[in-house]
Amino acid sequence: MEPGSSRPGQGRRKGASAGLRSGSAEGLDVSVILAAPGWRAAIKQPEALARRAAGAALREAGAEGAVTVLLADDTTVKRLNGTHRAKAKPTNVLSFPGGVPGYLGDVALALGVVQREARGAGRRVAAHFAHLVAHGALHLAGHDHLQAGEARRMERAEARVMRRLGLPNPWRGAT
């Protein structure tokens, strides 16, 4: 979770929602809301990759429960970032803890930011996306990166998740 963030509205889990896909296994339930259709043009089967990345991260952390991943556009994430973190710009990923037993929380990603960051780093959009979903899920499981030691532990956990997904270590070659 980003410092100073809080959970958005509680209404998303109730009822059917357009673009909602769910998958569960081993005490995990990962729902994906496709709010920006551009994700499908950017990444092959983004819902499936989001479920795999979130599930791998939660298993890495030994966490169980439900998570919702929102695949949004920059405008939506900018609004969430402004409302919950008082920052008037989009960011790559936001995490909001669930606050109720069995519900770990929500992860929101901004399509444009993810694409620009991947391009800027010379990475595939799908690999960067999976890394950010895992990063957000690890926040929901209690990881953080405010202090150097905890940041290093979180980076190592992310690298293990990416290896399990068969994707490159996002920290290899990073300065």
Image (cartoon, helix red, strand yellow):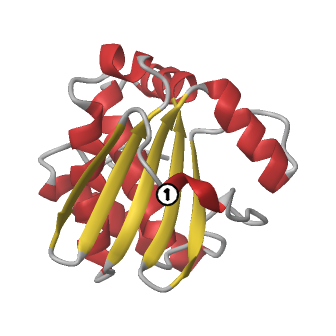
- Furthest toward the front, the residue is 15
Q: Position of residue 54 (x, y in %)?
A: 32, 58
Query: Where is residue 89 drawn, in percent x and y?
Result: 78, 33
Q: Answer above or below: position of 42 versus 132.
A: above
Q: Residue at x 74, y 62 (%)?
A: 5
* Quarter of the view holding residue 79: top right
Q: Residue at x 52, y 21 (%)?
A: 116
Tag count: 1
Give residue 52's position: percent from left, percent from top. 21, 52
Mark 1 closeness class: few <14, some 14–19, many ≥20 residues within 10 Å: few
Whether residue 39 sits left or right of residue 83 in the image: it is left
Badge 1 amino acid: Lys
In the rendered view, tell whether residue 135 sits above or below residue 32.
Answer: below
Quarter of the view holding residue 29:
bottom left
Does residue 163 appear in this view?
Answer: yes
Name the residue at 28% across, 83% down. 62
In what element is the residue under mark 1? loop
Residue placed at 29% from the left, 23% from the top?
A: 43
Q: Kindly identify which residue carries mark 1.
A: 14
Q: Quadrant of the N terminus?
A: bottom right
Q: Against 145, is 106 above or below?
A: above
Left or right: 28 as drawn, with respect to 67: left
Question: Would you say residue 152 is visible in this rendering?
Answer: no
Q: Nearer the viewer, residue 126 or 118?
A: 126
Q: In the picture provided, is 60 more to the left or to the right than 120?
A: left
Q: Position of residue 11 (x, y in %)?
A: 60, 56
Left or right: where does residue 13 sit relative to residue 40? right
